[in-house]
Amino acid sequence: ERRDFNSGERKPYGERREFNSERPERREFNRDDKKSFNGRREEGFDKRKPVAKRFDKGDFNKPRTNSYSDKPTEAREERGDKRTGKSEKTYGSAKANFGGKNLFKAHRPVEESDKWTPTYKIGGYKDTAPKKVQKKIEESERKSNGDVRLNRYIANAGICSRREADDLIKAGEIKVNGKIVTEMGYQVQPGDVVKYGNRKLSREKMVYVLVNKPKDFITTTEDPDDRKTVMDLVKNACEERIYPVGRLDRNTTGLLLLTNDGELADKLTHPSNEVEKLYQVELDKPLATEHFDQILKGITLEDGEIKADELGIVTPDGMVVGVKIHSGRNRIVRRIFESLGYEVLKLDRTTFAGLNKKDLPRGSWRFLTEKEVVKLKFFI
């Protein structure tokens, strides 16, 4: 006999509730509240082709890695954006986490007054380095222990770069053992006394300081108008006299390296080495698609042609972009955008020669690590 499952008295199971009557509204698990770049755009921006498709060769939103670690990383910095109040990503930072140690935690605030400086034992990396790098380290050791060219000796004394040292030698400003030397290839031997004016020169301990420059600081060692300079930021860093490597203009923020290693300064600023820099640029209006293409293909300025190595859109409104470039020409990033009719509202250098702003607040500085120095001296 077939049983009727609908017959019989039903047992009460307690008070029935309306479904969702007391539950908060559920959000979909994969819901994304952020507007996609190809989604709805503000008026005036939606008529153009989406430039986000230009990330085939250089996607600025992908995690980046460095040569010492294969872990993908991103560096973030709070930006005081008056338009949205939201923090945005900075680009090109690589996490220098060597051997599982966070080497950036030892950065020193500007207000500290101790004069401790690290000692860089570069030779310790010789055994594990590639053969090509081993030869470079051995050559560096021979030069530091034996005879050395006069311009190199002057640069290593923290006076100036080697190119500037050549000018001092030509001008008869340098004396060796009491005699003026103008020979460009002159070799200084151990025990020689080298003087610049009345100052006796000696090989200083090499110091490398990375600073996150704020706005309104001049990149110079001295300013006749007594304005704030980058030297004010690092005045408590060391006893040795250090110099900026390259420059950032007054309104540009971000990474700046200071050192008394004249040879390294020459290397990082010479155009032939094509040292990579990464900037985050905030514009007064969205970057047009045709200008995006033009910057990558190359534009002509008053001092010649220039093009970006990579270009990426940072914010959905197209007003903040990331630019990778190796040129060190004066105000080059600002001039690129100004030539196309844009005003640069903010310009921040987020990466310089593989160095980044990780754990380095605006206005603070830190010493480079040994591995960073090795990378700059022998891997670029």
Image: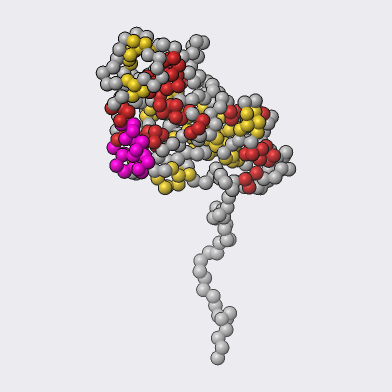
Furthest-bottom residue in this view: 1
Residue 44 in the magenta stretch? The answer is no
Which segment did they paint magenta?
Answer: 124-141
| Image quadrant where one finds the C terminus | top left
Which one is in front, 255 or 180? Answer: 180
Quadrant in the rendering for residue 21: bottom right
Tell me what residue is drawn at x 31 percent, y 39 percent: 126
Report the side of 31 relative to 288 (left or right).
Answer: left
Q: Position of residue 319 (x, y in %)?
A: 63, 36
Most distant residue in the left direction: 191
Above or below residue 149? Residue 223 is above
**Residue 350 visible in the current orientation:** no
Residue 121 locus on image (x, y percent): 29, 33
* Residue drawn where x is 42% and y is 41% of the image: 95
Quadrant the N terminus occupies: bottom right
Q: Main secondary structure of the magenta part?
A: helix
Question: Foreground residue, 109 or 152?
Answer: 152
Query: Looking at the image, which is closer to me, 189 or 37?
Result: 189
Residue 259 image offset from top left, x and y in percent: 40, 25
Which residue corresponds to the image point at 59% horizontal and 30% vertical from the top-left?
333
Q: Is residue 69 above or below residue 267?
A: below
Asked if residue 239 shows in the view, the reply is: yes
- Residue 47 at x, y percent in the picture: 73, 43
Residue at 36 percent of width and 23 percent of height: 149
